[in-house]
Amino acid sequence: MKKKKNNELDFYYLSKDNKNKRVQNKKKHPKKKLKKVNPEPMNDDMFNIDNEIVIGVTVLPPKNGKSGRKNQSKKKVKKQKNKKQDVRPQNKFDVTDKEPNKVRPVQKGQAKKNRPVKRIPYEEERKRRQKREKRFRILKIILKILLLFAIIIGILLFLFISPVFNIKKINVQGNSKINTEEIESLSKINMNENIFRFSSRQIEENVKENAYIDTVEVKRKIPDTVEIIVTEREAKYQLEYGNAFVYIDGNGNILETSNENANLPIIRGYSTAQENIQVGNKLVDEDCNKLLTVEKFLRSAKSNEIYDIITYIDISNDSDYKFELPSKGKVAYLGDDTNINDKIVTLKEILTREEGKSGQIFINDSNKMPYFRENV
C-alpha cells in the first residue's frame, strides 16, 4: 500500500512529458490481472494515507480504472444477493417484477406473445369441427334447393309463355253413342290456348254433363295436342214415362228420355218418384239393388237364348220377380234371386213344351215342382 501511495505521489510531481510516457508504457504493456486475494486485516497502527491530510498535496478523484471496476463488481454482487433474496416459486403464467407491488410495463405486441396458450381438449375440438361441418352441409343443401327452385321457376315460365305449347288439336277416343264434336264442345277447350293452363278436372266435369259419359280421362300430348278418353254408359232397360220412354243403364242411371221404343226390357214396379225421373239422375237405392238381380236373370236368359222374348220385368216384389212374355202369351213367376240359372233352364223347357198356349208359369216355390197353368 505504501509503495502504491508513493507511486501516486511521484506521478503527481512528474513533468507532463514523463507522465505521458508512463501512460503510453502502461497501454503498451498492460498489467496482467492478478487474482483477487482477500486482504489481510489491517492493524490500527498501520499508516493509511487515505485518512490523513498531507500539507501541500491535493487528493485526486478516483479514475475510471481499477477503483471503478471494483465499485461495479460490488454493485453486481449486491444485485445478485438481492435477486437471491427475492426468488420465490412462480406459476407458469404469473408475470411479476422484481418489486412485488409494481407491474412491469408491457410494450405493444408483447401482450399477445406473453399471453398463455390455452390447449382445447380433443373432444371439444371434435365437437366444434362437427358443428362446422354440419353448418356447411346445411348451407350446401339450402343452396342446392334454391338453385333447383330457380330452375323450376324458369322451366314453368317457359312452358306457360312459349307459343310452342298452344293447343292445335283435340283427339277424342272411346266414344260410340256420342259424336266427337259434341264431346269437344262439352270440354270447352279453347284452341291456341296454352296446353298447361286448363284444368283437367274441370274438363272431366264438363264432359260428364252428358249422362251417357261414365268416365273421362284427359291427357296432354306435348307440345300441342289434348287427348280425351271416355267410356260410355249403355242403356239396358227402359221405363214407361207417360207416352215416352226413359232409358237407364244397369246401375239405374237415367240416360235419356225418348218417344221411341228401344226394344229393351221395360221395368215396372219401381219405387222412384216420378218427379225424380230426369236425365242425369239415378233411381233410388232399392230399385238399383233390384236391377242387379234382374241383370243376373237376363244374363242367364241370353245364354239360354230366351232374352229377346222378355218384354216386361216387374220388380215390385223382390221375393218374386215376374217376367212377361207377350209374344208367347205367358207370364213367368221366378221367385227370389236363388238358383237363377236353374230357373231359367226350367222356364225354357216349359216354353218349349207348352208352345202355342197362353197362361202362367210358376217357378217361384222351392217346395213345389214348377208347373204351367193355362188360361181358360
Image: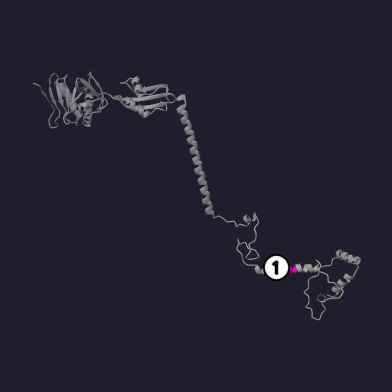
Image quarter hosting the C terminus:
top left
Quarter assignment of residue 357: top left
Q: Camera-side residue: 291 or 219?
A: 219
Is 212 a magenta residue?
Answer: no
Is 74 a magenta residue?
Answer: yes
x, y percent for residue 54: 85, 76
**Residue receiving disc 1:** 80
Q: Residue at x 65, y 68 (%)?
A: 86
In the displayed structure image, the side of residue 104 where residue 313 appears, left or right: left
Task: Write the start and end of the magenta stretch as one range.
Answer: 73-82
Q: Residue at x 51, y 48 (%)?
A: 131
x, y percent for residue 208: 32, 26
Up/down of 131 relative to 81, above or below: above
Q: Camera-side residue: 149 or 352?
A: 149
Up/down of 97 relative to 10, above or below: above
Identity, as a three-letter code, of the amino acid under mark 1? Gln
